[in-house]
Amino acid sequence: MIKTVDLEKIFVVRDQVVRAVDGITTHIKSGEVVVVIGPSGSGKSTYLRCLNGLEPLTAGHVHIDGIDLANRKTDMNKVRREVGMVFQQFNLFPHKTVLENLVLAQMKVRKRSRKEAEKKGRALLDKVGIPEKESNYPSQLSGGQQQRVAIARALAMDPKVMLFDEPTSALDPEMVGEVLEVMKQLAREGMTMVVVTHEMGFAREVADRVLFMDYGKLVEEGTPEHFFTEPQEERAKLFLRQVL
Amino acid sequence: MNSYLKNWLWRSLTILVLLGIVAGLWIATKRIDYTWRWNRVPQYFAYHSEDIKTVDFDGLITKIDKKGDLTTVTVKNAISGETSSFIIDTETANVSVDEYLMEGDTVGSTREWKAGPLAHGLWVTLWISAVASVIGLVIGVVTGLCRVSQNLTLRQLSITYIEIIRGTPLLVQLFIFYFFLGTVLNIGRLPSGIFALGIFAGAYVAEIIRAGIQSIPKGQMEAARSLGMNVPQAMIYIILPQAFKRTLPPLAGQFISLIKDSSLVSVIAITDLTKSGREVITSTFAVFEIWFVVAFLYLILTFSLSQVVAWIERRLAVSD
Ligand SMILES: Nc1ncnc2c1ncn2[C@@H]1O[C@H](COP(=O)(O)OP(=O)(O)O)[C@@H](O)[C@H]1O
Ligand SMILES: [Mg+2]
């Protein structure tokens, strides 16, 4: 489903070279839930953003369903509609109602009729548990509700993969659960997911595989049981001691 | 209750101060023996024009048909026998049936209200400003988008335009447009003036739009792109509507400025409100009255615009 080969992303800011992603090779299979963890600044977000082409690659390849993002001829817009993304800061469109947030891209990108798009939008709002908020504006929703709308908005495009970049980090603690619940349900339904998170409980319970990143490199990878009970690398052990 | 009373005291003071200033002005003009002729002003807004209908032949009135305010008088040519009808205002009709009219005699007249020079000037200012605003908005949005574009040439061209326009006086630009471009491209004074105003406003609008676009969090563009929208779609549906909402107050300020700046087109002999004012003054010598009236008319235009904008802002505020 997603293959990355020697993926590299280097930022140069005023002669400062930051190797945000430094040669990552992985294969994420269809239906797999992969959790990416690592200290802040280790390149998790950048890695995720390379997977849907939000960051142009410096070197290496990302293959999504066999399509190479590094190929200049690849239509990025076509790839992105297959790859949903949920951001830490929700990034809902504040000038549109909840339903409009879900409908807009369906109509403009997927070319669905308004009726069809609204039907899909309502069904998804139902699924994430806020059917009654469709005509509210994002600013009138709690953080947890906004993030659930953001998930529904991404799902409305019928993506093959969902990327989550710390979806619960900006939430008040009492709202974390409701968002994780929606994500767990998605995982149960067989969605392919790549999740950057600090929620170790979620990783243990839902992940098929855990990737541990540090300094842009993939330091350790394995099943949650393996990773949380007997990590091999020193840096992974250190990180786990700090977060657990 | 106490603060309510206090407010009223301050308000009364405001009114008192304003009245004081007016009284001061009045006394000052008294001392230079200026005679105010406010009564002469209204006729320059609208006047009753009388169109006197006369016969250009000798003839006999055969019929007078009164229908409300209008009366049709039918006159039979004494020589050829042809009949002609005249439509006049009933109250001006003082002829009777079988009366014989000589060539040049009056049958009656029609009266109608005509717009005076001030009303005409106000209208010219209004539509010149409106057209120039639309031009300025279009140029401004396009230039603003170029200004934030990835393409270096587009960025540099837009910066050059903005710097040239903002770095030179509008008055000089008007002359250049009128004398140089007007002659070279052979366009008249009115298009020259309107384009000069529009292009002038465009440079400021561009900077406002650029600031507006850049004030939208990066996450909005990323969210739009992550849904598969291309850059134009993201701009049109996501970024620009939000930028427009944020830039509405400065944009309104810019268009209010444009209305005021449009008074400069009078130097290339466009009969806008200012030029009309000057023309009326040459025939009335009511210098003070006319300039006060002209100022007041500009104030009405700008105030109406700011009211409209305030209304739009309230409507857009529902998503806050
Ligand atoms: N747009 C950017 N420009 C320059 N440096 C960046 C940019 N985005 C991220 N970085 C740098 O790349 C490194 C990895 O960042 P990030 O992927 O956000 O880490 P994480 O999500 O794991 O906290 C950091 O050192 C960060 O400063
Ligand atoms: Mg991050």
Image (cartoon, rainbow, N blue to C red):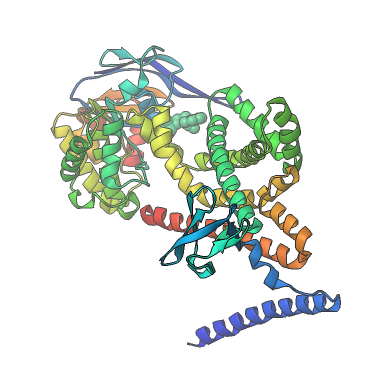
User: Can you give x and y, in whole percent of width and height, for residue B80 in the image?
Assistant: 52, 47
**Residue placed most toward the observer, B33 or B261:** B33
> On the rendered structure, is B94 left or right of B240?
right
- Total marks shown come to 0
Q: Residue at x 68, y 48 (%)?
A: B271
User: Can you give x and y, in whole percent of width and height, for residue B66 in the image?
Assistant: 42, 66
Q: Is residue B310 above or below residue B79?
A: below
**Residue placed most toward the observer, B193 or A194:** B193
Residue B156's quadrant in the figure? top right
User: Can you give x and y, in whole percent of width and height, for residue B273 in the image?
Assistant: 66, 54
Q: Residue at x 68, y 72 (%)?
A: B39
**Residue placed most toward the observer, A165 or B19:** B19
> On the rendered structure, is A159 left or right of B280?
left
Residue A187's quadrant in the figure? top left
User: Can you give x and y, in whole percent of width and height, for residue B111 in the image?
Assistant: 55, 62
> On the rendered structure, is B294 left or right of B208?
right
Residue B152's quadrant in the figure? top right
Q: Residue at x 46, y 48 (%)?
A: B245
Please indicate, yes or no, whether residue B303 appears anywhere in the rendered image. no
